[in-house]
Image (tube, helix red, strand yellow):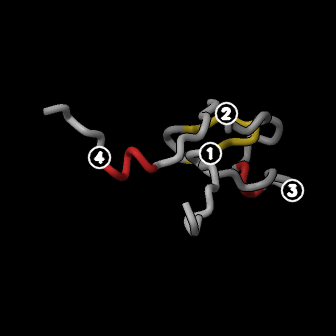
Amino acid sequence: MANPQHVLLAKARAYPHEPIDLRPADAEYDLLAGAWINRRSGGLLVESANPGPPRTKKADVETGEDQKGY
């Protein structure tokens, strides 16, 4: 008897994954401080005037959980 694929795996949609570099351009992570440091000012990135938009850590792809009819 063949090993059939689980029904959830058979019905799941696959999406392409492209690695994205989410590191801020003008900052570096300080392990001791546990925070991103602004290279220009030397202060915390979150306290700078324009820290940039928030980004997801995992670069999640929104798929819409409510895909009725599929």
Which residue, given by chain and number where applicable, does mark 4 sit on? 6
Residue at the spot 50% in from the left edge and 38% down from the top edge: 31
Q: Residues within 10 Å of mark 4 (few under 14, many from 20)?
A: few
Tell me residue 63's x, y (percent).
Answer: 62, 56
In the image, taking residue 52 as reference, residue 62 lies left or right, namely left
Mark 2 vs 3, N-terminal side: 2
Which residue, given by chain and number where applicable, does mark 2 sit on? 20
Secondary structure beneath dot 3 equals loop
Which residue, given by chain and number where applicable, does mark 3 sit on? 49
Which residue, given by chain and number where applicable, does mark 1 sit on? 59
Q: Mark 3: which amino acid?
A: Ala
Q: Is residue 15 above or below residue 19?
A: below
Closer-to-camera residue (10/45): 10
Secondary structure beneath dot 4 equals loop
Mark 1 vs 2, N-terminal side: 2
Q: Mark 1: which amino acid?
A: Ala
Farthest right residue?
Answer: 49
Q: Toward which corner of the image does residue 29 lie, by quadrant?
A: top right
Farthest front residue?
Answer: 1
Q: Mark 4: which amino acid?
A: His
Q: Residues within 10 Å of mark 3 (few under 14, many from 20)?
A: few
Measured in 3D between alpha carbons, the distance from the residue under mark 2 to the one under mark 4, in whole angstroms, is: 31 Å
In the image, taking residue 41 as reference, residue 3 lies left or right, namely left
Residue at the spot 64% in from the left edge and 31% down from the top edge: 18
Q: Residues within 10 Å of mark 2 (few under 14, many from 20)?
A: few
Determine contact: label 1, label 4, CB under 8 Å. Answer: no
Mark 3 vs 4, N-terminal side: 4
Q: Is residue 33 above or below residue 68?
A: above
Measured in 3D between alpha carbons, the distance from the residue under mark 1 to the one under mark 4, in whole angstroms, is: 27 Å
Q: Toward which corner of the image does residue 54 lie, by quadrant?
A: bottom right
